[in-house]
Structures are given as C-alpha cells and as structure tokens.
Amino acid sequence: MRVIIQRVDYAKVRFPDHKERSIEKGLLILAGIEEADNETDADWLAAKIINLRIFNDQDGVMNLSVQEIGGQIMIISQFTLFAKTKKGNRPSYIRAATPEKAIPLYNYFVETIQKQTFKKIVTGEFGAHMEISLLNNGPVTIIIDTKNKE
C-alpha cells in the first residue's frame, strides 16, 4: 500500500452529484493499493499513521499525533499512486489492484483506522470521479509505502 498523508486545516471532497464530505484539522490520506497488498500491510500502515507525530506541540515542534490533537481523518482511494511512467508518456497502472481486490482491502484499512481512533473516518467513493480541496498546513506531506518501510 502506498499513501500520501497531508496535514490539513481542512479538506473537502465533492462528487459529481454535488454531494460533499469534509473534515477540519487533521489528515487527508490518499491511499493506493497494489495487487501484492494484504491486511498485514493495512494493519501496519494504520498503526503508523495514527501514531505519526506531525502536529505541533505547545513549543511549535512536530511532536503530536492526530489522536493527541483530536484531529479528523479523510481517506480517499487513489489507484494513480501506482502509476508507472518509465516507458512513454501515458502512465501505466498495471501494479494497481483490481477493484475486486482493492475495495475490500480499502474498506478494511478504513475500518482499522476507525476502530483504533474511535472516530468516524470520512471517505471518498471508490472509483468515483471526485474533486478534492484542502488547506495543507506547513506544508506537511509524507509518503509511506508498505513495501519500502523507510
């Protein structure tokens, strides 16, 4: 699994029918799933995200987690995180998981974070065209890949 995590003051996702979902201060997570991913990846990633200390403490030092600040979380599925661009100019998404594999694992990932944070997680709609707006605070943007745990 590969995620892009953004520390935000707010994030909003809008759908073609003009329905919107939003969060205030917290994390916007764009999540990509590849064929090789499984629940172990989702468990590790959920724990890493929940405990990631990227919010400022009273001294202005990034020392607090989303849990500690009472922040909200939005998770959007994004298969394009597995784009391969080495050959030609049109990205290939061959590594991205098929919907049959990705949807259950995406739902498991969301549920795992929800169970550990005891908060409702705001999500997009898998496979839907969405417009996302946000105010990145910092900016703080972090990429985590379960196949390359740096």
Image (tube, rainbow, N blue to C red):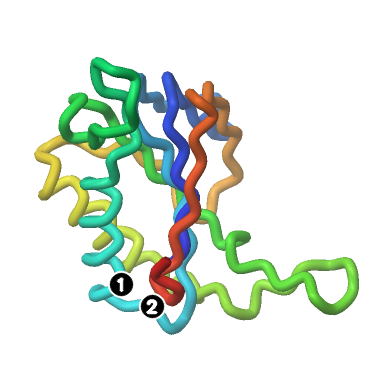
Q: Distance between the residues labelled 1 and 2?
A: 6 Å
Residue type, mark 1 in image: Asp
Write down the residue under mark 2.
37
Q: Whole-percent x and y of residue 41?
A: 30, 72
Neighbor class of circle 2 (other Cα within 10 Å; few <14, some 14-19, many 20+) is some
Q: Whole-percent x and y of residue 46?
A: 25, 56
142 in relation to 37, above or below: above
Residue type, mark 2 in image: Asp
Neighbor class of circle 1 (other Cα within 10 Å; few <14, some 14-19, many 20+) is some
Label 2 element class: loop
Quarter of the figure that contains the C terminus: bottom left
Residue at 78% from the left image edge and 70% from the top image edge: 85
The quarter of the picture where residue 58 lies is: top left
Q: Whole-percent x and y of residue 63?
A: 26, 33
23 in relation to 52, above or below: above
Drawn side of residue 24 relative to residue 2, left or right? left
Q: How many marks?
A: 2
Residue at 67% from the left image edge and 67% from the top image edge: 83
Write down the residue under mark 1.
41
